């Protein structure tokens, strides 16, 4: 950035201009009024004094008066010029600084009132600092607008998600009271299922809000990965058996010690493994591979299930996102699991990425976590 475009130099320059104009006019005025007319006046007074030496007191008084008038005139000229320069530079500062700042202040007030569509035109002749300020202000407003849109969408999503199990429950209760359903064990089991879905959803939303707000603690310490994997495999085996899905586990670089939160790591792996089972048809396969690279452990959960369309991959970790809205809801998914998992992985210094060659071509989720040094 050129130095003269900086606000600091512009302000110093405008003050300097006023001083320079004042001093210059003063010099010109002194040259013109004192030096030029003064010799004439002084000479006339002196020659009168020479002719009439007795009038010395009167001539001295006249000389002093002339001198005072001349000094006053030059100072007055300089002062008028400095005032004009001052007014000129104030107008420039007003237009290039105060006006855009005032607009920013007014728009901030409107944004505070909830009008997020407000933007300020970027001033072209106000210097780089002002352009930066207005551009940052507009970017901030845009982010606020996006956050507001996400908030509205989130509220919409939550109410939509809550409506599904509630509608189901409502149907059963109405059916029971109208005598359409028998108050049998089966009916109550269906109702219980809807209630469980509802409470699972509420739990998920609660954890998501805490995690997104950073209101959760991590217990980062070294632990062996294999026992956690064994635990998860035992936990998930009823689902595997039920769907006749086979699980192949493989550890490429021997025992691994992670530096992460044990329970949170287990939570992520359960999410990835149960997704793999959920989105893999009967008689499918799941591969759980563990290896290391540099100072990271790489845990890959791969399946040969329904896969993920390429255009859905970028949205997979967004809140409430499901590739197939209706199918996933029927299977009980809320679309929050991966969002939570990714936040947890990030908080532990790792990451999760999703890979798939497309629909029905299987999927792979790669979790990286730091190794214990
Ligand atoms: P959900 O509870 O719906 O499974 P997630 O956040 O865990 O929520 O997953 C989001 C979406 O990602 C799922 O609804 C599904 O469409 C897709 N997905 C996740 N894992 C897999 C997988 N292994 N195979 C295919 N699709 C998957």
Image (spheres, rainbow, N blue to C red):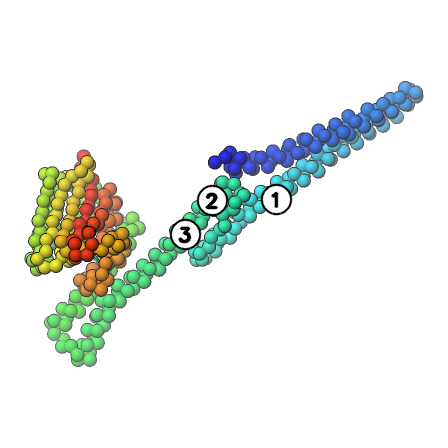
**98 sits to left or right of 221:** right
Pointer 1: residues within 10 angstroms few (<14), some, or many (20+)? few
Counting residues from the N terminus, which is met first, the one under dot 1 or under dot 2? Answer: 1
Q: Quadrant of residue 315?
A: bottom left
Which residue position is annotated with label 1? 91
Which residue position is annotated with label 3? 142
Which percent across, then down, holds residue 120?
49, 51
Counting residues from the N terminus, which is met first, the one under dot 3 or under dot 1? Answer: 1
Residue in view at x 41 percent, y 52 percent = 142
Cα separation, mark 3 vs mark 2, equals 14 Å
Helix, strand or loop at disc 1?
helix
Which percent across, then down, holds residue 190?
15, 69
Circles 1 and 2: CB distance less than 8 Å? no
- Residue 367's place in the image compared with 182, above or below, is above
> Which is more toward the observer, 358 or 306?
358
- Ligand 1 appears in which quadrant? bottom left
Q: Quadrant of the C terminus?
A: top left
- Residue 176's place in the image compared with 216, above or below, is below
Which residue position is annotated with label 2? 133
Helix, strand or loop at disc 2?
helix
Q: Quadrant of residue 115?
A: bottom left
**348 sits to left or right of 13:** left
């Amino acid at each position: 950035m050129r130095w003269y475009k900086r606000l600091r130099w512009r302000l110093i320059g405008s003050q300097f201009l006023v001083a320079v104009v004042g001093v210059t006019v003063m010099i010109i005025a002194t040259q013109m009024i004192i030096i030029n007319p003064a010799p004439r006046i002084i000479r006339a007074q002196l020659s009168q004094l020479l002719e009439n030496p007795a009038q010395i007191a009167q001539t001295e008084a006249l000389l002093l008066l002339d001198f005072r008038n001349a000094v006053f005139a030059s100072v007055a000229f300089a002062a008028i010029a400095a005032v004009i320069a001052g007014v000129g530079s104030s107008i420039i500062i007003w237009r290039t600084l105060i006006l855009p700042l005032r607009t920013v202040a007014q728009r901030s007030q409107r944004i505070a009132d909830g009008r997020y569509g407000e933007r300020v035109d970027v001033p072209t002749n106000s210097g780089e600092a002002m352009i930066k300020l207005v551009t940052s202000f507009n970017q901030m407003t845009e982010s606020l607008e996006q956050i507001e849109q996400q908030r509205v969408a989130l509220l919409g999503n939550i109410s939509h998600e809550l409506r599904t199990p509630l509608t189901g429950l409502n149907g059963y209760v109405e059916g029971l009271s109208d005598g359409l359903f028998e108050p049998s064990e089966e009916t109550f089991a269906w109702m219980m299922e809807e209630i469980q879905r509802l409470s699972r959803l509420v739990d998920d939303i609660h954890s998501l809000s805490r995690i997104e707000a950073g209101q959760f603690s991590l217990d980062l310490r070294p632990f062996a990965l294999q026992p956690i994997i064994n635990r998860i495999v035992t936990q998930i085996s009823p689902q595997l058996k039920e769907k006749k899905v086979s699980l192949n586990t493989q550890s490429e670089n021997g025992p691994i010690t992670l530096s992460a939160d044990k329970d949170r790591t287990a939570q992520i792996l359960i999410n990835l493994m149960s997704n793999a089972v959920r989105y893999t048809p009967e008689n499918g396969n799941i591969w759980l591979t563990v290896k290391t690279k540099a100072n990271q452990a790489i845990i890959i959960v791969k399946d040969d299930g329904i896969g993920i369309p390429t255009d859905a991959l970028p949205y997979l970790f967004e809140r409430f996102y499901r590739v197939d809205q209706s199918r996933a809801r029927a299977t009980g998914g809320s679309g929050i699991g991966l969002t939570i998992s990714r936040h947890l992985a990030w908080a532990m210094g790792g990451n999760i990425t999703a890979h798939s060659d497309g629909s029905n071509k299987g999927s792979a989720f790669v979790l990286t976590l730091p190794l214990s040094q």
